Amino acid sequence: NLSFQTRNVVSKKLMSTKRPEDDGPMLDNINLFGYITLMSCVIMTPVMLLFEGFPFTPAWAEAHGNQMKFEEFALKSVYAGFFFHTYQQVSYLILDRVTPVTHAVGNCVKRIAVIVVSIII
């Protein structure tokens, strides 16, 4: 939680920094999110390869047996990635319009709502 809120505060500061030539934002929310995503991919890919390694597919097949085909798993992973990316884009759009504290409170309320709905369902 601390890292996410720190990222939000730094992102808000970068979004509110003005360019001297035209007084526009230094980075808008979409570009900032793109840069953060690319940087995290570059940083975390070696870490993932170090801890997980390349034998992902055999380990996955052994764990799931014949329950799910790899193509179905890959498609579900693409869907999950798309929806998570969309969620993050919306989060940055909201962060552009509110203060980081308001964004953090809203995020906490969202988590509580998800937990309650998960219990009910």
Image: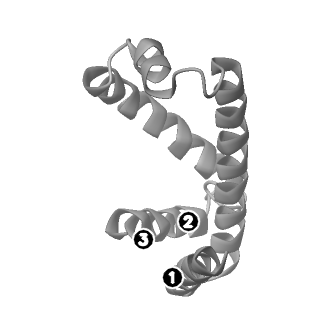
Question: SS class of the residue under badge 2?
Answer: loop
Amino acid bearing label 1: Cys
At 66% from the left and 21% from the top, the residue drawn is: 69
Q: Quadrant of the C terminus?
A: bottom right
- Rendered location of residue 15, percent (x, y): 59, 64
State which tag comes first along the sequence, 2 or 1: 2
Viewer-nearest residue: 31 or 58: 58
Where is mark 2, residue-wise?
A: 17
Give the SS element for disc 3. helix
| Residue extending furthest toward the left | 50
Circle 3 sits on which residue? Answer: 5
Q: Which label was assigned to residue 108? A: 1
Residue 66 percent location from the top left of the image? 59, 21
Q: Which kind of residue does numbered mark 3 sit on?
A: Gln
- Percent from the top left, x then y, of residue 55? 38, 12
Is residue 29 something that shows in the picture?
no
Sequence-wise, the earlier of marks 3 and 1 is 3
Helix, strand or loop status at disc 1: helix
- Disc 3: CA contacts within 10 A as few (<14), some (14-19) or many (>=20): some
Q: Count the marks.
A: 3
In which image quadrant can residue 40 be found?
top left
Q: Position of residue 64 (x, y in %)?
A: 51, 27
